[in-house]
Image (cartoon, rainbow, N blue to C red):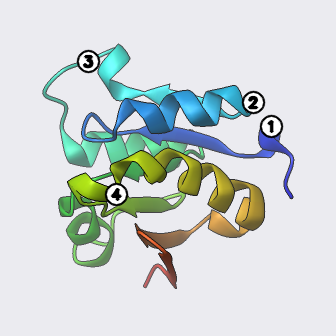
Amino acid sequence: MTDSSALRFMADESCDFAVVRALRREGYDVLAVSEYTQRSDDQLLIEQAAREQRIFLTEDKDFGWLVYVSHASSAGVILLRYPANARSSMAGAVVQVAHEQGEALFGRFVVMQPGQVRMGRRP
C-alpha cells in the first residue's frame, strides 16, 4: 500500500467523475479539468500534468498518440477502457491500482480494462 499524499492526479474531462470522487475519498490530490475549464487542449493538459507531476487519468485514446508519437513529456498516464456494462467497477479499480502500484505509476503509460492492467514504460 502507498501513501496517498505521494501521488497526485489530473483527471481529463473524459474521465468519469466517479473516479475523481473515489480517489479524493482515499486522500489523493486530484485536479479535475471539468471543474475549471471546458473544451481543453489535450497538449496543454498533458504539459500541465507533467509540470505539476500529476498522473493523467483519461478515457481518451488520443493521449496515447500524444505520449508515444509526439513524445510529449508526461508524469504518467492511466487510460481507462471500460465498457458501459463494467463502468461501476472502474473507480474502485483505479483506487486499487493507485494503492498497489503507488509511485511505480510515475512515467508509465497504464491501460486499465475490466480485470486487466497493462503497465508500459514511455518510449
Is the residue marked by circle 2 packed among few (<14), some (14-19), or many (20+) residues within 10 Å?
Answer: some
Say which label, 2 or 1, has the lower sequence index: 1
At label 2, the amino acid type is: Gly
Can you tell which mark lies on residue 54? none
Residue underneath mark 1: 5
Residue underneath mark 4: 86
Q: Nearer the viewer, mark 2 or mark 3?
A: 2
Q: Are marks 2 and 4 in contact (CB under 8 Å)?
A: no
At label 3, the amino acid type is: Thr
Can you tell which mark lies on residue 37? 3
Determine the secondary structure under disc 3. Answer: loop
Let me know if residue 73 appears in the view.
Answer: no
Say which label, 2 or 3, has the lower sequence index: 2
Q: CA distance from mark 4 to mark 1?
A: 28 Å
Q: CA distance from mark 1 to mark 3?
A: 25 Å
Q: Are marks 1 and 3 in contact (CB under 8 Å)?
A: no
Return the x and y of residue 59 as percentages of the image width and height.
Answer: 28, 53
Closer to us: 70 or 42: 42
Closer to us: 123 or 112: 112
Can you tell which mark lies on residue 27? 2
Closer to us: 93 or 2: 93
Determine the secondary structure under disc 4. Answer: helix
Q: How many marks?
A: 4
Return the x and y of residue 4 as percentages of the image width and height.
Answer: 79, 41
Q: Is residue 66 above or below residue 116?
A: above
Image-quadrant location for residue 48: top left
Say which label, 4 or 3, has the lower sequence index: 3
Determine the secondary structure under disc 2. Answer: loop
